[in-house]
Amino acid sequence: MKTVWISEFIGVDGVGINEVEAPRPSRNEALIRVRAAGVNRADLLQAAGRYPPPENYSPNMPGMEFAGEIVELGAEACGFAVGDRVFGITTGHGQAEFVVSHPSLLAAIPDNLSYTEAGGIPEVYITAHDAVFTQSCLKAGETLLIHAAASGVGMAALDLAKAAGAKVIGTSRTADKIEKLADLGLEHGIVATDGKFAEHVLDITNGKGVDVILDLVGAGYFAENIASIAQKGRLSVVGLTSGTKAEIDLGSILRKRATIRGTTLRARPFEEKAAANENFIREVIPLLDSGEIRPHLDRAFKLEEAGEAYGYLASNKSFGKVVVEF
């Protein structure tokens, strides 16, 4: 089979195509013919040698989400049938013509979505839902602050928060992306080119601060996050694009009784991923099925253009998901 292949861990210039042996499903797995697979920031990090996958996954074969149809089922794999359209998350190898998966990590694709649209959904919507709702317990009427709101996870979080009746503030480094996010329902946008946003957040919230922060940026925003958070606020750190080390004012955290949680989806045990996927099926799929939320597809590339897809995502020009089609 053909697969996106990282020949050298030097960034996007090392990304190409290779032929490898197709996987075979075990007795409790499904074999999926992949029709589309999303490209994520984590894939860029893997291509640069900065985010190696867990054991038993090749560092040369990226891909953490996919959409396709089931072509074979192991003897003990249940819940789906051959021919079913499914999408799901995987620890790696998702950007290949075939992938194997346990059924607990799959979901049925709503009829109103194409494979290309579906290929860019699972990783970002499961990550956003898990961080914002399962872990940070965002409720209707509360305020969510999303950093890098124009990213795949950021836009998914915006969709889900609006559907839940929460208020949303978003940051981005560019004004044009803030304008585009306003068309998607973002109530308050902040251009945070200099990494400063707390004063704006406090003005918007009349000094209260925000109840939940979804941080996809990391260390560079930490002090401003603490200044922006409300009493009993919850900070969920998902991304570290600005670094991993920050100075912490413990006094502010104590006074605000704030909760800080770090989270990642890829390295979690199977049982936790399955639980996150179950929540996705129960709470997000109905919104996609009804059309209340729609995936944000920026651009699709053919498999032979995988290197271009990676380069486009790395350029920061994308607005929404970048997908490779098979």
Image: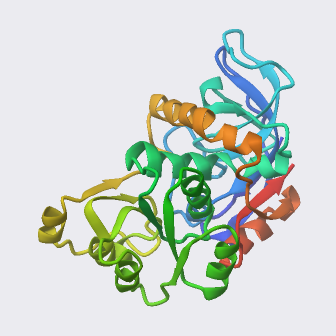
Quarter of the image with the N terminus is top right
Which residue occupies the foreground of this view, 308 or 116?
A: 116
Q: Which residue lies furthest to the bottom in this view?
A: 194
Which residue occupies the foreground of this view, 290 or 239?
A: 290
* Image color mode: rainbow
The picture quadrant where one finds residue 44 is bottom right
> Would you say residue 13 is visible in this rendering?
no
The picture quadrant where one finds residue 29 is top right
Residue at x 78%, y 32% (from the top left corner): 32
Residue at x 51%, y 53% (from the top left corner): 52
**Position of 76 relative to 167 (above/below):** above
Position in image of residue 326 (x %, y %): 87, 49
Q: Which residue lies furthest to the top in this view?
A: 75
Position in image of residue 204 (x %, y %): 42, 79
**Position of 127 relative to 243 (above/below):** above
Position in image of residue 308 (x %, y %): 79, 70
Position in image of residue 89 (x %, y %): 63, 41
Give left or right: position of 3 versus 219.
right
Residue at x 65%, y 45% (from the top left corner): 122
> Would you say residue 127 is visible in this rendering?
yes
Which residue occupies the foreground of this view, 107 or 4?
A: 107
Residue at x 70%, y 79% (from the top left corner): 317
Give left or right: position of 11 versus 259.
right
Counting labels gives 0
Give left or right: position of 58 versus 38.
left
